[in-house]
Amino acid sequence: MYTRFITCAKLFYGVKMKKISESEIEKYFCWVVEMMGGKAYKFKSPAQRGVADRVACLPDGTTHFVELKTKGGRLAPLQKIFKNDMDLLKQNHAVLWSHDHIDEWSTNIKRS
């Protein structure tokens, strides 16, 4: 929460911000999921490359596969294949690039 406050304050007062790292975006995502009452697990599959970074399990019983990127980051070819597989299997999948995207994602989930 404190980090988010500092980020907002820097934007408000016009302080130039450094590029946010993917690990910082992951930390924020985990915090948002916890505030929603869920758990965000780091997802690694030794047998399958290209899987999403995180699996978010929410209290309403839904599971979301989430790929986190820095601003300007692109999906690798295997990540695109994973995204298409999730779409074909009608699974919840999202690619999020910033704190704002994470906030929008969580707001949309709370509405549904």
Image (tube, rainbow, N blue to C red):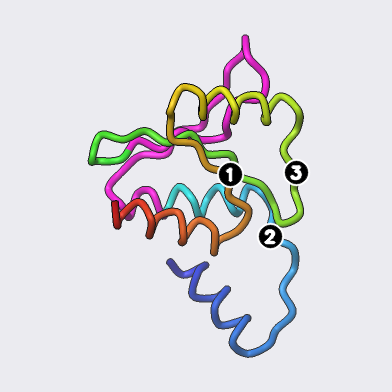
Could you say where residue 66 lies in the image, as x and y percent from the top left?
52, 39
Could you say where residue 41 lies in the image, as x and y percent from the top left?
45, 33
For the record, the magenta segment spans: 32-57
Q: Is residue 29 magenta?
A: no
Secondary structure beneath label 2: loop
| Occupied quadrant, residue 81 | top right
Could you tell me which quadrant the N terminus lies in?
A: bottom left
Apparent side of residue 17 relative to residue 48 in the rendered image (left or right)? right
| Occupied quadrant, residue 56 | top left
Disc on the earlier residue, 2 or 3? 2
Whole-number angstrom distance, CA of label 1 to CA of label 3 = 10 Å
The amino acid on which the numbered mark 2 sits, given as a three-letter code, is: Ile
View extreme (bottom): residue: 13
Disc on the earlier residue, 2 or 1? 2
Residue indicated by mark 3: 74
Relative vertical location of residue 87 with respect to residue 107 in this rendering, above or below: above
* Neighbours of disc 2 within 10 Å: few (<14), some (14-19), many (20+): some
Residue indicated by mark 1: 95
Whole-number angstrom distance, CA of label 2 to CA of label 1 = 16 Å
The amino acid on which the numbered mark 3 sits, given as a three-letter code, is: Arg
View extreme (front): residue: 88
Q: Does the magenta stretch include residue 44?
A: yes
* Neighbours of disc 3 within 10 Å: few (<14), some (14-19), many (20+): few
The amino acid on which the numbered mark 1 sits, given as a three-letter code, is: Val
Nearer to us in this view, 101 or 53: 101
Q: Are marks 1 and 3 in contact (CB under 8 Å)?
A: no
Q: Which mark is residue 20?
A: 2
